Amino acid sequence: MTPEQFIDAALWFPETDESEPFGPGPMVYKIAGQRMFALLSPGGDGGSAMVNLKCDPELALELRAEFPAVTPGWHMSKRHWNSVRLDGTVPDDELLEMLEHSYRLVARGLRRADRDRVLAVLGEDSPTIDTEH
């Protein structure tokens, strides 16, 4: 997946805002301007772009074991965030699942009215996951 394809996918989710709060380069994706669910960093010096995505801790470990391009979150909580190099080694469908998982985890931490509104648009009820960490 290219960075441009990732941007399109991230912006597909309800009430997603895109900003550059850290200056030019890294793009932050938040739900309703409140909470970040993805951070896209451009590749520098010919390197691959990287995206940070929130993840359930047990699943995070499984993904890191399965894909060499998935590592503990760079400059994030290593337990709750993964960094994924966009180098083509993680299949697009897997990356899209990781993106949706991150969105849903973060959405569950919103105020009830906001959470219910954004998750209702996705049309699926998901089991409650502990997002207090």
Image (cartoon, rainbow, N blue to C red):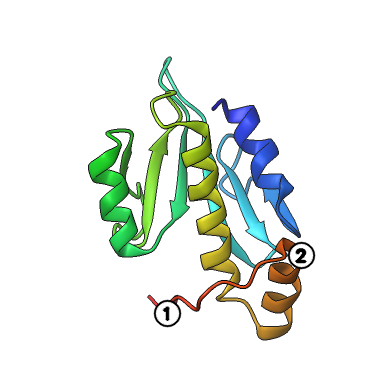
Name the side, left or right, on which 64 lies relative to 43: left
Residue located at (56% from left, 47% from top): 22
Q: Nearer the viewer, residue 119 or 50?
A: 119
Q: Nearer the viewer, residue 92 or 86?
A: 92
Seen from this angle, which residue lies furthest front? 124
Disc 2 packing (10 Å; few <14; some 14–19; many ≥20): few
Q: Is residue 48 above or below residue 132?
A: above
Residue 68's x, y, as percent? 27, 33
Name the side, left or right, on which 101 lies relative to 111: left
Seen from this angle, which residue lies furthest bottom? 112
Label 2 vs 1, first from the N-terminus: 2
Distance between mark 2 and mark 1 Cα atoms: 23 Å
- Any mark on residue 121, and which? 2
Residue located at (57% from left, 64% from top): 104
Q: Nearer the viewer, residue 25 or 34?
A: 34
Which quadrant would residue 26 be assigned to in this image? top right
- Any mark on residue 132, and which? 1
Q: Amino acid at mark 1?
A: Glu
Looking at the rendered structure, the secondary structure element under dot 1 is loop
Residue located at (67% from left, 76% from top): 115
Residue located at (23% from left, 44% from top): 65
Looking at the rendered structure, the number of numbered marks drawn on it comes to: 2
Residue 107's x, y, as percent? 60, 69
Q: Amino acid at mark 2?
A: Val
Which quadrant would residue 44 be assigned to in this image? top left
